[in-house]
């Protein structure tokens, strides 16, 4: 399916409600939305064409009428013209000053995608916990044979369930994640956290990150299912009703949209 408006067009390989809505907005909008990628945090590079790079995602976003630009979390405020900010992995954590700038960006109505990897830095874990999103201590192990059928290993969990949310409504293909930390929900007064994608109950959390075990160990490991991605929005009060609604998505893995996996159609569609 091709959605076209004047000189702009967007091809949709898998027709879903979110994909159609996104395509219509992209080709009909007079503004080219800017997707900002945090640079300098030690994550994936947007110009890197290797398996861990994001050049494939950049190409997909550019073809979908997005402008991709790097920004620094270490210097100054996050630019106000960032339609969304992506932090694709933060293996060394995020400094306290950068977390403060993220808070300010969200308070202005920012939209943040925070793609994590195990082990999650304590500072980041505390940051997302305020929004009702928890990060496990280990890594998800998938024991189902479904992943093996498509070449995924035990440390490549599959999205068996897509939840009813505008981002994932209509999705029915399996997304393959890389080494992922399990996510969970906890009561909060800030926002409305909801799962986007989850594992099957055949998955478990191997708490020991050094171990190579792929079988559940009673008393040491934790049984699933687990959320692989969680979204939350923060409703505005009457005083700030004119401001955009802050939105945050957290994923337990940053590899699912890197070059090594984004060729998988479901991965590409979920990333966009």
Image (cartoon, grey):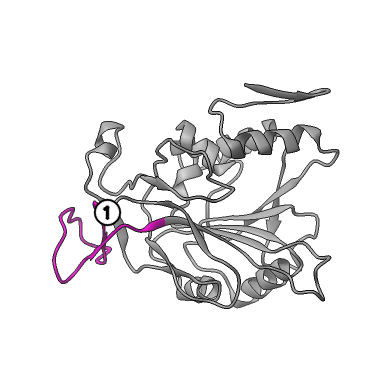
- Element class at badge 1: loop
Decide whether residue 206 is among the magenta residues: yes
Measured from the top left, where is residue 124 in percent x and y? Answer: 51, 71
Quadrant (top left/top right/bottom left/bottom right) for the N terminus: top right
Tell me if residue 14 is in the magenta stretch: no
Q: Position of residue 136 (x, y in %)?
A: 36, 67
Q: Residue 23, relative to residue 166: is it above or below?
A: above
Could you tell me which residue is drawn at 67 percent across and 72 percent down?
A: 103
Front residue of 171 and 39? 171
Q: Name the residue nearer the viewer: 127 or 160.
A: 160
Q: Is residue 259 visible?
A: no
Please give the name of the residue rendered at 86% of the width and 38% of the height, measured from the top-left corner.
Answer: 30
Question: Residue shown at 80%/55% (left/top)?
Answer: 81
| Residue 22 can be seen in this image | yes
* Horizontal arrangement in the rendering, residue 113 relative to residue 145 (left or right): right
Query: Could you classify mark 1 by the number of other residues whose Cα lies within 10 Å: few (under 14), some (14-19), or many (20 or more)?
Result: some
Q: Along the horizontal axis of the image, is 145 left or right of 238?
A: left
Location of residue 224 by image quarter: bottom left
Q: How many marks?
A: 1
Residue topped by disc 1: 201
Of residues 213 and 11, the one drawn nearer to the viewer in this rendering: 11
Placement of 165 over or under 125, stated as above or below: above
Q: Which secondary structure class fits the magenta region best?
A: loop
Answer with left or right where residue 272 lies relative to residue 143: right
Question: Magenta segment range?
Answer: 201-227
Instruction: Give the image location of residue 253, x and y in percent.
Output: 44, 53
């Amino acid at each position: 399916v091709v959605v076209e408006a004047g000189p702009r067009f967007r091809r949709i390989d898998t027709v879903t409600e979110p994909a159609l809505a996104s395509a219509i907005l992209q080709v009909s909008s007079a503004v080219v939305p800017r997707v900002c990628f945090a640079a300098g945090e030690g994550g994936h590079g947007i110009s890197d064409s290797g398996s861990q790079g994001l050049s494939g995602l950049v190409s997909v976003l550019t073809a979908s009428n997005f402008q991709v630009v790097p920004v620094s979390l270490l210097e100054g405020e996050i630019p106000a013209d960032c339609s969304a900010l992506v932090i694709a992995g933060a293996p060394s954590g995020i400094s306290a000053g950068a977390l403060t700038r993220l808070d300010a960006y969200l308070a202005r109505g920012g939209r943040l995608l925070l793609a994590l990897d195990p082990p999650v830095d304590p500072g980041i874990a505390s940051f997302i916990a305020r929004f009702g999103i928890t990060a496990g201590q280990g890594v998800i192990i998938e024991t189902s044979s479904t992943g093996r059928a498509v070449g995924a290993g035990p440390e490549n969990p599959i999205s068996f369930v897509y939840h009813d949310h505008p981002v994932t409504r209509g999705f029915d293909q399996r997304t393959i994640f890389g080494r992922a930390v399990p996510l969970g929900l906890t009561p909060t007064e800030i926002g409305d956290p909801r799962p986007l994608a989850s594992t099957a109950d055949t998955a478990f959390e191997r708490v020991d990150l050094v171990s190579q075990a792929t079988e559940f160990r009673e008393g040491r490991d934790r049984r699933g299912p687990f959320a692989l991605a969680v979204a939350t929005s923060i409703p505005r009060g009457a005083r700030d009703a004119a401001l955009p609604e802050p939105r945050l998505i957290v994923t337990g893995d940053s590899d699912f949209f890197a070059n090594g996996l984004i060729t998988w159609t479901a991965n590409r569609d979920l990333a966009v």
